Amino acid sequence: MSYKSPLNCRRFSLFTLILLICLHGFSQSSFDAVDQLLKQNQKAFGGGYVMLVVKDGKVIYQKQANQDFTAKSPAPIAGAANWMTAALVMTFVDEGKLSLDDKVTQYIPLFGKYMKGYITIRNCLTHTTGIKTDQSVTSVLAKQKFETLEDMVNTYANKHDIATNPGTEFFYSNLGPNIVARVLEVVSKKSFERLIRERITGPLKMRGTNFANQDGGATNPSGGAQSTANDYINFLTMLLNKGTFEGKRILSEKAVEQLETSQLAELPIKYLPRELTGVRFGLGNYISGTNSTGGSAILGCPNLLGTAPFLDKCRGYAAILITEKPAAAIEKKPIYQSLVNLVGEAVGGGCQ
């Protein structure tokens, strides 16, 4: 029979108490500056919002603006869904069913008929298709109702002109992700909604995420998704874990590396929203920070509604700010950059 000294027990209890106090201090006071930034800019975020930060599989910071909008509440994420669409593409690349440099016309011959035969899958994921789009065209398309994703993408082929050769300049638009989503439908003979559920959102337990068009009509991968803070953080955690989630592999390490590699960095930029100026392009995401060797370190995919998912590979954390409603029409880049900086300071560490 063993004997434990009461003195040793008291020492252990005191040590445990001190450790808990230290951890509590980290989770609260370390993020004071983040609290202040969110409070000051609540109006810019559209009122209701949720902020989550996860490190080593644990939530180290959580904040919400009101009781009604929580980490489980779905909200439109628009362009922030492009990261997931790119990940879905990479599951097909992992299986050898397509290549990033395959031409779209291999799968949708209509593009070749209308002088768009050189557009590749990579072009679709990096805003370099060369297809002409401007404010007037976007406004017209926004009012159109398509029955299927096929109808929508065929319109890109036969109703839009080519403005420049593919892969020669960046022009931000929603066309590319929708085109590549249709390619996946052709390759698999399954709907995009089913594919994203089977390969990404299902395995990642993203039960509150869907791409169904809330207004009816066709699925719109680049602008119609809804998700929750809890859901999206699972996606980011998978990327931090180099393609695995809860012991299950979703993407190969090589696929994750390709998603996070800067693409076509030397190209001129024809148009970018102000929130994205100064970044480099990954596949479906944007690189805003690099390590000492020039590799990607901080990646994100902010949308124009206010939602901003991002991760820091050097500090090993993932974070998302998700907004309940479209944010105010003000420049948000300084706010986003401050948010990334302050979260990084709160977490500590960094690239070597």
Image (cartoon, rainbow, N blue to C red):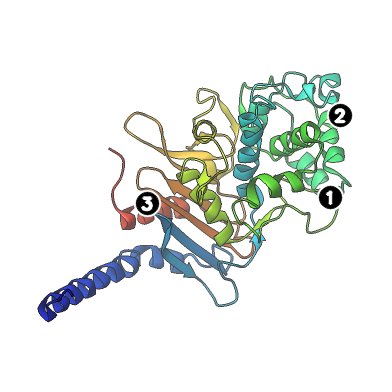
Mark found first going from the N terminus, 1 or 2? 1
Judged from the image, the secondary structure of the residue bearing numbered disc 3 is: helix
Q: Is residue 13 visible?
A: yes
Q: Nearer the viewer, mark 1 or mark 3?
A: 3
- Does residue 265 sit above or below 219 in this rendering? above
Task: Give the image location of residue 163, x and y in percent.
Answer: 73, 24
Query: Which label belongs to residue 158?
Result: 2
Q: Residue at point 62% right, 21% down? A: 168
Mark found first going from the N terminus, 1 or 3? 1
Depth order, front residue of 192/97? 97
- The residue under label 1 is 143
Task: Give the image location of residue 15, x and y in percent.
Answer: 18, 71
Task: Give the image location of residue 54, x and y in percent.
Answer: 43, 57
Q: Residue at point 55% right, 61% down? A: 230
In the picture, residue 234 is in which quadrant?
Answer: bottom right
- Does residue 172 sit above or below 197 in this rendering? above
Q: What's the residue type where badge 1 is placed?
A: Lys
Task: Determine whether, in the image, residue 105 is placed left or right of residue 301.
Answer: right
